[in-house]
Image: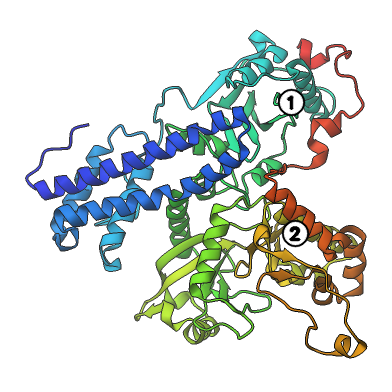
Amino acid sequence: MEIPTGENPVAQAIARTLFDGFNKHYRLFRESSAQAKARFDSGDWLAGQRAVRERIAFYDTRVNETAGQLHEQLQAEDIDDNTWQLAKLLYIGLLTNHKQPELAETFFNSVFCKIMHRTYFHNDFIFVRPVVSTEFIESDPPAYRSYYPNQAGLRQTIRDICMDFAWQCPFANLERDVEHVIDAVLRQFGGKLVAAEANFQIQVLHSAFYRNKAAYIVGKAINGDYEYPFVVPVLHDPDGRLFVDAILLDPAQIRTLFSLSRAYFMVDMEVPSAYVDFLSSLMPRKPAAEIYTMLGLGKQGKTMFFRDLMHHLRHSQDKFAIAPGIPGMVMSVFTLPSFPYVFKVIRDVFAPAKEVDHATVKAKYVLVKQHDRVGRMADTLEFSNVALPKARFSAELLDELRKECPSLLEENDSELVIHHVYIERRMKPLNLYLDSADEARREAAVLEYGNAIKELAYANIFPGDMLFKNFGVTRFGRVVFYDYDEIEYMTDCNFRRIPPAPNPEAEMSGEPWYSVARNDVFPEEFGTFLLGNPDTRRVFMKHHADLLEPEFWQETKQMILDGFVPDFFPYPEEMRFSRMFEGESRQEKQPSEAETA
């Protein structure tokens, strides 16, 4: 596309440099995402993990590169306001018929904010509000494919959907998998499907969604006035052949699949807004900001989140307040009761027990961002120079922030600017949850807590501080870890058994009688700090006594060192066809009513 003509060559050069910088970024982003299909075909799971980590850095690399070009070529920091405003208008002209205009607007913001002072962060200079519409952008091929079972038959339609992804690996037994899908759908609908209307169709997003060791087919069935979302995970069997593992039909299960506590998907999208619109129709309660983030477009997720926050502040009256729970030694945490997130600011000075500094804490959060969170670590939005209305802060919270985080604050009469803040989905701290839980909920939560620790260990993460207050319970009852200042890679830890005391006096001493290196961990000590409550201890020992023995940790560490990549299923085990149809012979079964419909 040709740049619009104008009388200001500097403005034209700014617009073109920004435009080219974004296009380079998205080209590389899309290439990395598209390669996920080849990695899935070859079963190269470690390469997939590396690609997810590396792709996260793409955006900042291109922003820094583009800002550097503007500095070197145009001395951008010295450019007058009128030129910057014209550059924005020219940039808008370049986005006509662009396939990713919303992402390009955000890229413009990122580069501009890297160069200019925050007093310029308003709609005259950046895209505080989106300008270019993302509706009805055409892509080639289209964002989703449509199938018509009334013409082809349901069995053939399911077979076509699976084969149209053109995976190079063969299916081990696609006929069996088709049977499983049909039977699972029948079970969901009480044994009989509703009559097919004239408009009965199945829409499936063109690209599969790749994460960990799975490819996910994402779509919806449309019949009359109703839409039925579904997700179909496809895995490798031990011989490297493909099989359909399950079909997720419950919207809550699909939302969990797209939880921010999991690694981002690899998806090949020419028009990302079309994918977001489609996914929003499957999960109408999930914010578009979170969907963009789960597609690997974290900066766009942050942009939309902040727009949502500003909109919410204009339409609410409650105040930011100190978050409930035991105060942390590293973070001051606050929340807005009517908004489902918490805001975490690093304290200037840590409690003496914490042997970390600000740089270490920030590095831990980067580690979590780049790592596979396996549904057990909360993802975090990291913001700089966030300006919030001071009148919306409680007096108690203002006092705490001024006392604990003064170096990160800047105030004027109307605004409180926080120079660095992490924002996470709000959860109920596990310690508070257990305090009020009945016997059944306590057992479920403690079982979940141990499962969370084990799954983190399998993913090469040792939580470090495993106190209940550092874990939260989601609205679906899942336990998630959210305090990262002491996490370590499992492979960097040395799990030891406490050696016998040389004499009774040593055992009674308050000091250890054995040497302790920095990353030495003694699992036998966990129970002393975690299991003071008898009811909690009983449940924990029933399900997770192995966590108090070094052998579990040593064996898990060795498994990781050997290069084994475990399976993490973001859906209940009982949803897997291997469990649902265990013991049944699918080859001899006669066609069902749904198959002949």
Which amino acid type corresponds to the residue marked 2 in the rendered image?
Answer: Ile
Type of colouring: rainbow
Position above or below: 226 against 559: above
Residue at x-position 32% and y-position 43%:
22
What is the distance, in whole Å, between disc 2 and disc 1 at their CAs?
30 Å
Between 406 and 290, the one lying in front of the other is: 406
Which residue of the protein is positioned furthest toward the left in this rendering?
Answer: 7
Q: Is residue 408 at least partly visible in the picture?
A: yes
Circle nearer the viewer, 2 or 1: 1
Return the x and y of residue 7 as percentages of the image width and height. 6, 45
- Number of other residues with Cα within 10 Å of mark 1, as a class: few under 14, some 14 to 19, many 20 or more: few
Q: Earlier in the sequence, mark 2 or mark 1?
A: 1
Q: Find disc 2 in the rendering and name its residue.
A: 453
Q: Give the structural element (helix, strand or loop) at label 1.
A: loop
Compared to residue 387, the image places residue 440 above or below, namely above
How packed mark 2 is, by other alpha carbons closer than 10 Å (few <14, some 14-19, many 20 or more), is many
Residue 136 spot, x, y in % from top left: 41, 30
Q: Which residue is mark 1?
A: 239
Residue at 18% across / 58% down in the picture? Answer: 76
On screen, residue 504 above or below 472 = below
Mark 2 secondary-structure assignment: helix
- Which kind of residue does numbered mark 1 sit on? Asp
Q: Quadrant of residue 257?
A: top right
